[in-house]
């Protein structure tokens, strides 16, 4: 891929020091262009850790190593905290799972969105306010002026996620990392939020990394998929090709999903092969 | 086997969480209650179990109306498996103690090897008996929860989203286990879920709940064909398909 | 981690660390061992624990630690400064201060034990019952708790002294009776949140009686935070007892009690500072030790950590 937005080569993350260090992610490589890239895996696969590592948001106990981890021309590994603070929000956004926990409960949502703007742009409060209302409209919230005055506990889950999206997009990033953005939402609300995300990504030409445990969701929503297991990449392939996946873990995962439309006697159970832990797979 | 008539559950002054629900479940059947969060499906289950004694309407077991405070014998016939494997086991008791607890509470002396047999029946190693819940994985905890529910040899299992908190691969194992146990023991299941795929896989008949009421009911074949006619069910199906499983056909 | 190969040590270590415990006893011991390892990562907590151990040793082994009688008077040698013969000097009655400090540890232990025996069961039971049963039981029990909460410990002690005569036991009972309400509230708060837990619902669905649920399932969960709170409060209790002793309401002469020693030594504070220094430091150090140990204990026992 030429001019990737994000490039990761041989990423390794371990917690702890020396002999007691626990490797959590090993040999992960992928690249992100102006597309929707999904990172799929079960709990403990390391997908959220990778997402946080890209933003350098891991706790100090985490040791991140890589041959290359870059956003455009910035080396994310070597960047100073100051440089990272300028990147976060302004160039790279992060959407978290549950607005109940990711929004400040004692500040009205409008102020939180405006703060996201003011952190990266100097200007009068009036401009921040106008931009807040504009972005709230862009995320399809009716009556943005009223909603901006509400507190997080006064809005529904779906609306909270739209607020989170607004907060992340107002500063105009190039890349958005979404960590299980719809897992806490009902199925019908999920649809609306995903439609919205899709539209915004397309219209602004952003790159999206969608981290999820929901294989069905990722395969329908994303362009390409990274399958992770036990901290390693098993396979990277276009979402449309998932039916023809080659790695036994991917095939096993797909097979063990119950289906609405296909009657099955027993669900095939994924048998974990220790050989999968040996090497990293997939080409970026 | 189980019949529910005009069940109404209110919490305080708010509009009722369950606003008049009626359905019947045959012996040996698996009945599914599907809906989004807040529709009242878990509330129905808890009222059925007798955890919530403040309800209106009737619940019948084998034709006899059950008093809201369930008699002790009821629990030998109906048991429940909860959603969160991390919250349904006592954090500070060994697995063995938790498996023997139901027998003790019913005043029954445990038969020899009760714990070992229970662990065998859910596919857990016997060494799990002396472990504490935090030493087990989510799937293993859910197996213990199922084993515990089966200690009193019930005929009916109420399953409250038994696999929502589990990984996909673990979910498959647990669903298979539930199907095996159903076949071996002739159990009747009432399964509550928000996941249409799980419900389509496990259930014979399904009811859709919205806003505290049942708005649609059909059998599994109809669901698989994608032909339910109620607009809300259509919406649920469409949502599962749009960014989810491919549509039928 | 591999076991060492020296037979008994390796065996015990492996037994404690194995993944598959084979008896309930082994499992329980493993939990204890893990808790201890956790505790041992807090150097300050370990220091606190060491001091508490020293306190216990001093109390138990007092006759072996000092040859002097803490009560026998020796007016010839009164108010001697610290020397080789008298490590902490002598007080106004010629008694060896070191001996009185060491024997005073017994009084301190007596205070701690008596308070715990009164406060822990009362607080636990009242709080757990109020929290789990709710309704009018909760109301009544909490109002009773409020009544006791409204008494300041010192005032109650004065009242007890007036009614029953001064003495260390009466003073302790007075302190304990005002120390249990916060424990009850703590237990109640835990019971309230546990009431909604799925594992409690599961036990209800087995037909368990309310008594069984409270005693077997709720109380064990309330215990850790209660133990931590009690340990942290112990410092305050010791200080209050010392204060009562200072006022002459607690331990009566000639019983060696650190607070009383500070009180009577006041007169000679300027010229003979050693009389009050040793007991004063003892009070401060033991209180601090309980605080430090309690902090470390909280980290080990905090149920919110998931263990």
Image (cartoon, coloured by chain):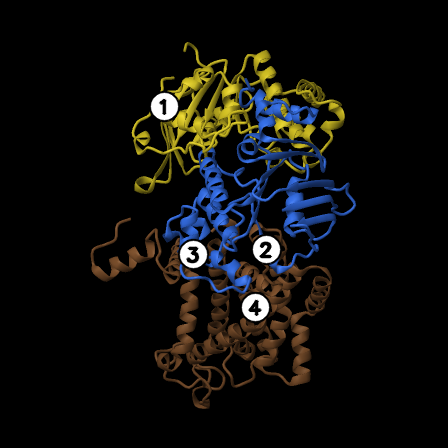
Label 1 sits on residue: A247
Q: Residues within 10 Å of mark 1 (few under 14, many from 20)?
A: some
State the mark number for residue C120.
4
- Residue at the location (55% across, 62% down)? B105
Distance from Cα at disc 1 to Cα at disc 4? 59 Å
**Quarter of the image containing the C terminus of chain A?**
top left
Q: Does mark 4 fall on the same chain as mark 1?
A: no
- C149 lies above or below A117: below
The blue-coloured chain is labelled B
- Residue at the location (65% across, 32% down)? A157
Distance from Cα at disc 2 to Cα at disc 4? 35 Å
Nearest the eye: B12 or B146: B146
1 vs 4, front mark: 1
Label 3 sits on residue: B115
Q: Position of residue C155 (x, y in %)?
A: 68, 74
Q: Is residue B141 visible?
A: yes
Nearest the eye: C245 or A145: A145
Circle 4 SS class: helix
Query: For chain C, what colour was chosen?
Result: brown
- Residue extending furthest right? B13
Q: Position of residue C173 (x, y in %)?
A: 60, 76
- Residue at the location (54% across, 85% down)? C253
């Amino acid at each position: 891929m030429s001019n990737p937005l994000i490039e990761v080569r041989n990423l390794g993350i371990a917690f702890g020091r020396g002999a007691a260090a626990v490797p959590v992610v090993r040999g992960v490589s992928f690249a992100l262009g102006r597309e929707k890239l999904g990172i799929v895996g079960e709990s403990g696969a390391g997908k959220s850790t990778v997402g946080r590592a890209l933003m350098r948001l891991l706790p100090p106990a985490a040791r991140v190593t890589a041959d290359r981890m870059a956003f455009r021309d910035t080396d994310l590994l070597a960047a100073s905290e100051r440089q990272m603070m300028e990147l976060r929000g302004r160039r790279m956004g992060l959407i978290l799972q549950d607005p109940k926990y990711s929004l400040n409960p004692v500040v009205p949502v409008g102020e939180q969105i405006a703060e996201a703007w003011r952190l990266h742009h100097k200007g009068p409060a009036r401009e921040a306010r106008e931009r807040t209302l504009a972005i709230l409209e862009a995320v399809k919230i009716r009556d943005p002026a009223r909603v901006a005055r509400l507190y997080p506990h006064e809005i529904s889950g779906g609306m909270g996620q739209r607020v989170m999206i607004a907060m992340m997009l107002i500063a105009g990033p190039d890349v958005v990392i979404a960590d299980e953005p719809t897992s806490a939402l009902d199925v019908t609300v999920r649809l609306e939020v995903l439609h919205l995300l899709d539209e915004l990504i397309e219209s602004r030409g952003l790159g999206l990394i969608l981290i999820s445990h929901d294989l069905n969701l990722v395969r329908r929503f994303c362009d390409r998929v990274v399958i992770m297991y036990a901290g390693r990449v098993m396979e990277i392939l276009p979402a449309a090709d998932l039916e023809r996946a080659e790695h036994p873990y991917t095939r096993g995962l797909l097979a063990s999903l119950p289906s609405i439309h296909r009657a099955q006697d027993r669900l095939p159970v994924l048998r974990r092969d220790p050989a999968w832990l040996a090497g990293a797979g997939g080409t970026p | 086997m189980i019949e529910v008539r005009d069940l109404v559950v209110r919490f305080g002054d708010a509009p009722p969480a369950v606003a008049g629900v009626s359905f019947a479940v045959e012996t040996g059947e698996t009945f599914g209650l599907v809906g989004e969060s807040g529709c009242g499906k878990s509330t129905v289950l808890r009222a059925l179990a007798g955890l919530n004694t403040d309800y209106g309407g009737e619940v019948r077991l084998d034709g006899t109306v059950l008093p809201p405070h369930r008699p002790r014998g009821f629990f030998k016939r109906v048991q429940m498996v909860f959603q969160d494997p991390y919250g349904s086991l006592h954090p500070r008791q060994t697995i063995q103690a938790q498996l023997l607890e139901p027998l003790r509470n019913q005043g029954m002396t445990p038969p020899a090897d009760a714990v070992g047999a229970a662990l065998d029946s859910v596919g857990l190693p016997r060494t799990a008996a002396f472990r504490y819940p935090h030493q087990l994985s989510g799937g293993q905890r859910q197996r213990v929860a199922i084993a515990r529910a089966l200690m009193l040899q019930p005929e009916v299992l109420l399953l409250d989203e038994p696999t929502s908190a589990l990984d996909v691969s673990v979910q498959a194992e647990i669903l298979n286990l539930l199907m095996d146990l159903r076949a071996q023991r002739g159990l009747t299941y009432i399964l509550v879920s928000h996941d249409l795929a799980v419900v389509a896989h496990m259930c014979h008949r399904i009811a859709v709940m919205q806003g505290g009421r049942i708005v649609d009911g059909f059998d599994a074949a109809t669901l698989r064909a994608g032909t339910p006619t109620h607009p809300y069910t259509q919406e649920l199906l469409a949502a599962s398909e749009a960014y989810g499983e491919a549509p039928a056909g | 981690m591999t076991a060492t190969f020296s037979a008994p040590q390796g065996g015990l270590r492996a037994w404690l660390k194995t993944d598959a415990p084979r008896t309930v006893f082994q499992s329980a011991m493993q939990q204890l061992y893990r808790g201890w390892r956790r505790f041992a990562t807090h150097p300050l907590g370990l220091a606190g624990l060491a001091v508490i151990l020293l306190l216990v040793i001093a109390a138990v082994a007092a006759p072996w630690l000092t040859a002097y009688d803490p009560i026998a008077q020796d007016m010839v040698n009164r108010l001697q400064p610290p020397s080789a013969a008298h490590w902490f000097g002598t007080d106004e009655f010629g008694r060896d201060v070191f001996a009185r400090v060491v024997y005073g540890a017994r009084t301190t232990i007596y205070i701690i034990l008596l308070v715990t025996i009164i406060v822990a069961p009362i607080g636990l039971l009242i709080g757990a019952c109020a929290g789990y049963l709710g309704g009018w039981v909760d109301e009544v029990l909490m109002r009773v708790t409020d009544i006791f909460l409204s008494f300041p410990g010192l005032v109650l002690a004065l009242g007890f002294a007036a009614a029953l005569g001064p003495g260390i036991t009466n003073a302790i009972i007075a302190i304990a009776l005002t120390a249990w309400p916060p424990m009850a509230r703590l237990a109640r708060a835990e019971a309230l949140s546990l009431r909604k837990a799925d594992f409690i619902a599961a036990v209800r669905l087995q037909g368990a009686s309310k008594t069984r649920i409270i005693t077997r399932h709720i109380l064990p969960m309330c215990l850790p935070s209660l133990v931590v709170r009690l340990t942290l409060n112990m410092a305050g209790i010791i200080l209050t007892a010392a204060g009562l002793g200072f006022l002459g309401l607690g331990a009566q002469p000639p019983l060696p009690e650190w607070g009383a020693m500070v009180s009577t030594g006041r007169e000679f504070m300027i010229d003979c500072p050693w009389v009050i220094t040793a007991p004063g430091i003892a009070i401060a150090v033991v209180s601090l030790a309980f605080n430090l140990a309690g902090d470390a204990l909280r980290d080990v026992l905090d149920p919110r950590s998931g263990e």
